[in-house]
Image (spheres, rainbow, N blue to C red):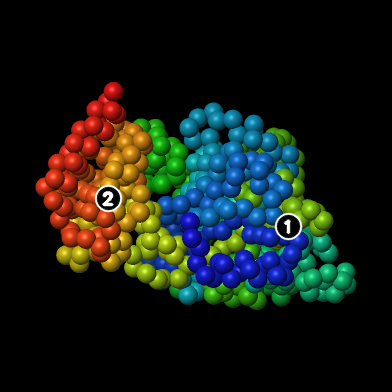
Amino acid sequence: MKRNALFVSCAILSLVTAPLFAGPKGTVQVRPIESGSVTIDGKFDDWNLNSYTTVARQPLYPDALDQDSTDAYGDHLVWEIDRVAGFNGTFTDDFDPESPSEFGSSVYFGYDANFLYGLAVFIDDEPNGTRDPGGLSNFLNDGLEIFIDAKGDSTDPADEANFPNFDTDFDAEDFGVTSNADDFQLTVGLNEEFENGAEQHLERGGNTDIIKEGYLDIRNDLDLSSVGGADIAAQEFSDLGAAGARNPEVLADPGTTFTGYAIEWVVPFGLVDGFEPDHNMGFELFWRDVDDPDFPDPGFGGAGIMWTDWAQNETVPSDAELGTGLFHTANWGQLEFVTAGDPCDFDGNGTIDVADIDMLSAAVSSGAGEARYDINQDGVVDASDIAAYVEGACLNTYLGDANLDGQFDSTDFVVVFTAGEYEDAAAGNSTWATGDWNGDSEFNSSDFVAAFVGGGYEVGPRAAVAAVPEPTSLGLLAFALLGLLALRRR
């Protein structure tokens, strides 16, 4: 997948300023959202989750453990037991499922001119927000924590002068190390003592002017009236699928009921120096799951807490020489703030590709597509918009061009029939690349009808030839289809 020019320039800059660490350890896109379109209430029906299509996926554990960079790139995160590392005494065996709802999480980001928005949808059969009703130890409850290098320029351990706290200007001068005053950690989690069910803190921040007893209670200290006054909220769900969750576990098993909760939060830009959405930021994240608050293991660093890290770190303190550990900024990934650009680029990754067609198809299939998917501007989002997208300026190819090489030919049939989804028993499982060319999420004869009507079989690239094939070409097409279908059924 291509990355935009901003990402490339930042990657080159990191090579120049930090030759010991290539970085970043993956990139997560932050989507622009319309100001006021998301309400902080713990629900996610106002997030367009269908538009988040690509998981920023680390290699299988432990392949990323000692790497200074990975190709993880996408628009959201998913907790996957074989792609995360445990720390503080947590092992993956600690997550042996007792039910389909034992644990899972999908995390999404968005932004407007004023705020960074976050949404985490958790599959969890035992949500826990009972610890420390005083609120200063939010990291002892279910939730997640996010490290941010606001300026995106740190390459050293952010804790080498002040562990377990982030370095401050004062400490940096005393210890003769690089200042990390723009690096901070957000703790987001459930807390039953609050009416909205959750709280967040800025923990161990480098800017001592905004610390209150070691933590910043964002809700009490900052004016968030532009989003209704709430900076965080949580909701529990007895059926995440019915609520519209897009966690891969839920989508893969629609007949099963998954229970869990969601946490939604915002963080104001300008919180620390450099925290503005005009550049990439360093980023790291780990999840917390508390099933038994009174049991000391797993997670001996905080009794009964299971901790897992997206970037596969196994230790909390940094190793300056190896460049590892949760606090080592060179071992973090990055947040990439996507700007509104090409209207054909639905996922905002700088590339118009099959993922964008699948987003359009999902909008057609749902029957409630946004105005941006109405390609032909007829007031309705339907199969005709897919044809307009594929045949028009967005892709300038033909319906049936499964591999998007610019033409519709026998290679595309090989691609779709190899996927094996033609008239299969699975409902709604097909995409553009596996034969769904009319946007109904199925691969069947109606997709061939749509492709035949498009008239592009074996006529080459759209701009180079006439749009309608000769009758002999249609005959060859029918013959080829019969042969392929016979081969498949055999």
Label 2 sits on what residue type?
A: Phe
Can the viewer see residue 165? no
Tag nearer the camera, 2 or 1: 2
* Residue at horizontal 14 percent and vertical 41 percent from the top: 475
User: In the image, residue 169 lies at what x, y percent?
Assistant: 79, 74
Element at badge 1? loop
The residue wearing badge 1 is 327
Q: CA distance from mark 2 to mark 1?
A: 50 Å
Answer with left or right where residue 435 lies relative to residue 103: left
Element at badge 2? loop
Q: Quadrant of residue 269?
A: bottom right
Query: Is residue 459 or residue 390 the one in the foreground?
Result: 459
Label 1 sits on what residue type?
A: Phe
Can the viewer see residue 81? yes
- Up the image or down, 20 lies above or below 170; here it is above
Q: Quadrant of residue 95?
A: top right
User: In the image, residue 462 lies at what x, y percent?
Assistant: 25, 60
Q: Residues within 10 Å of mark 2 (few under 14, many from 20)?
A: many
Answer with left or right where residue 104 lies relative to residue 414: right
User: In the image, residue 36 lies at what x, y percent?
Assistant: 40, 69
The residue wearing badge 2 is 408
Task: Kindly indicate whether the residue at mark 1 contacts the one at mark 2 (C-beta within 8 angstroms).
Answer: no
Q: Residues within 10 Å of mark 1 (few under 14, many from 20)?
A: many
* Residue at horizontal 18 percent and vertical 41 percent from the top: 476
- Up the image or down, 235 lies above or below 488; here it is below
Q: Residue furthest top?
A: 490
* Residue at horizontal 35 percent and vertical 54 percent from the top: 405
Answer with left or right where residue 262 lies relative to residue 421: right
